[in-house]
Structures are given as structure tokens and as C-alpha cells.
């Protein structure tokens, strides 16, 4: 093998992992389709508030807010949050109703890697709205027991 | 008694939207981590948190191992009438905790 062909070969080997890492892992898509079914998920109305860069993946503040009048006829029924690269795709599923007044849920989550987080809101009329956010994690959560 | 911190206003005007924040002491062990002896530590998480206002459920959230240790949850509620707001956590290993706060609505 001459030098030029060898270099071309190593270049493809290096490039491939980056290409595959950007694809949405199937487990998140499967978890989402379990919640959504065949309905269309549209972007918008949902705001996913999470820091873009976190130093410690063990506690990452996350707030999901949805634009909704929260009346008996038009309210957000549920908010689901999913991740790509934790061991399990689900983060939480909240059930809301007109008695909440505002469709806002806050919590703190663990992130095992830099990844995309997705929030999906289900309205009383059966529509699904979504938002996603990329988070870079420098220290991943739950690798080993704290000593 | 479990260690619980609840932050909510004691009084509210009728129809006002108030924020309720709750924090509970719990390891939220994922079940994916090896311990010091190399074997996996058994999962021990809080699976569900519910809030009721005078007995009516107003909010419920199903948690997963991806929720940080000492789970914190915040949500909003319309102050309808005076009474008690009960917060209940339940999870693995028979974990059951219920705490109530009183809210006066004027």
C-alpha cells in the first residue's frame, strides 16, 4: 500500500464515528413514539430551559414551560422529557391540568454525556408540541460510586 | 420523618397562580452504577410525586433514574380555596412519604 492510499483509508476511519454520533439514537425515538403514537409532533410553544454547558452532569437544572391558556377547554395535559444518551431515554412525564394555571415544570436531572434533550407537550386537543436543547457535559453523571 | 423541604406561599388571593417547590432527601440510585466492590448497586428511586389540593389531584409527575439525587420538583397551581396541599412521594423499596402544608386563600 502506498502512502497516499494509506492516508485516504485512515481519513475515512476517523470521519465515520463523528457521522454516526450525531444521529438520534433509536431508543429516544422509540420512547417518543410510545408516548406520541402516530400523531405529528410540531416544533414550538414549548420552551426548554437548560444550561448549554454544564460542569457536573449529576445535577442539571431543567425547566419546561409551555404557552397555553390552561383553561378547561384548552390546556396542556402532559409534559414529557427525553434524552439521547443516558442509559434510559425517559427523564420524566408530568400530568397537568387547568388547576395548574401555568404549564411550567422544573426539576434537576442527571446527564451521562453531552447530548440533545427533547421536551414534548401534549395539549387537551391532542396536539403535540416540542422543543429540544443541546447540552455539553464536562463531568458525566453516575460513572462510579462517590468515595 | 423524611427530610422534606416545601416552599409555597402561606396565603394567596383567590385565583392567584402560585408556585410550589418541593425537595426531598433521597439517593435516586440509578441501578446502573457499580459500587466499590464492582457489583451493580440496586436501583432505588422515587417513581412518582403527586400533589393534591383538598384531596383533588392537581399535579403528578413520573420520575426516572435520570432525575438528580434529592429530587426537586416545582410546579404551579391556581389558589382555589383555603385548605391543605398534600405532597406524596412513592418509589422503590416501599418508599412512601406524605407531607402537607396549609394555604389560606382570601
Image (cartoon, rainbow, N blue to C red):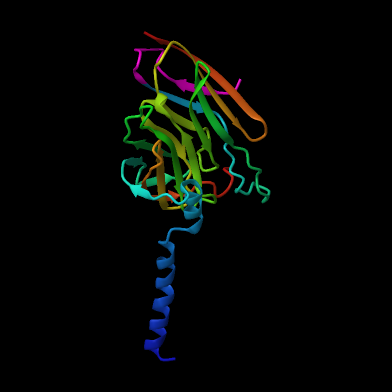
Quarter where residue B103 is shown: top left
Judge from the rendering whether residue A112 lies leftward or rightward of residue A72; answer left or right.
right
Residue B60 location in percent, x, y? 50, 30
Judge from the rendering whether residue B7 lies leftward or rightward of residue B48; answer left or right.
left
Residue B13 location in percent, x, y? 34, 12
Asked if residue B57 lies in the magenta stretch, the reply is no
Judge from the rendering whether residue A40 lies leftward or rightward of residue B91; answer left or right.
left
- Outermost residue on the bottom side: it is A2
Quarter where residue B45 is shown: top right
The magenta span reads: B1-17
Residue B80 location in percent, x, y? 40, 15
Eyeballing the image, is A123 above or below B100? Answer: below
Q: Which residue is found at the position 61% from the left and 20% from the top?
A: B1
Which of B46/A29 is in front? A29
Residue A102 location in percent, x, y? 36, 28
Q: Which residue is found at the position 40% from the left and 67% from the top?
A: A19
Q: Could you tell me which quadrant the C terminus of chain A lies in? A: top right
Q: Could you tell me which quadrant the N terminus of chain A lies in? A: bottom left
Asked if residue B8 lies in the magenta stretch, the reply is yes
**Does the image show residue A134?**
no
Eyeballing the image, is B92 above or below A86? Answer: above
**Does the image show residue A107?**
yes
Count of labels in the image: 0
Amino acid at each position: 500500500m502506498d502512502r497516499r492510499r494509506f492516508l485516504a483509508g485512515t481519513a475515512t476511519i476517523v470521519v465515520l464515528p463523528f457521522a454516526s454520533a450525531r444521529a438520534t439514537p433509536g431508543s429516544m425515538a422509540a420512547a417518543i413514539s410510545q408516548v406520541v403514537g402516530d400523531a405529528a409532533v410540531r416544533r414550538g410553544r414549548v420552551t426548554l430551559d437548560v444550561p448549554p454547558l454544564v460542569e457536573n452532569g449529576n445535577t442539571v437544572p431543567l425547566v419546561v414551560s409551555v404557552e397555553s391558556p390552561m383553561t378547561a377547554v384548552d390546556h396542556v395535559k402532559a409534559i414529557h422529557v427525553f434524552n439521547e444518551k443516558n442509559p434510559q431515554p425517559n427523564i420524566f412525564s408530568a400530568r397537568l391540568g387547568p388547576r395548574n394555571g401555568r404549564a411550567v415544570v422544573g426539576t434537576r436531572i442527571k446527564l451521562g454525556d453531552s447530548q440533545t434533550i427533547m421536551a414534548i407537550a401534549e395539549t387537551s386537543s391532542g396536539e403535540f408540541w416540542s422543543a429540544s436543547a443541546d447540552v455539553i457535559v464536562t463531568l458525566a453523571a453516575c460513572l462510579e460510586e462517590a468515595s | 420523618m423524611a427530610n422534606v423541604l416545601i416552599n409555597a406561599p402561606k396565603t394567596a388571593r383567590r385565583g392567584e397562580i402560585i408556585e410550589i417547590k418541593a425537595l426531598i432527601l433521597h439517593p435516586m440510585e440509578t441501578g446502573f452504577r457499580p459500587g466499590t466492590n464492582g457489583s451493580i448497586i440496586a436501583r432505588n428511586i422515587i417513581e412518582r410525586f403527586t400533589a393534591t389540593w383538598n384531596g383533588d389531584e392537581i399535579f403528578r409527575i413520573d420520575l426516572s433514574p435520570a432525575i438528580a439525587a434529592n429530587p426537586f420538583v416545582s410546579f404551579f397551581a391556581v389558589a382555589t380555596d383555603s385548605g391543605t396541599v398534600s405532597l406524596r412521594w412513592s418509589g422503590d423499596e416501599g418508599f412512601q412519604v406524605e407531607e402537607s402544608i396549609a394555604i389560606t386563600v382570601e
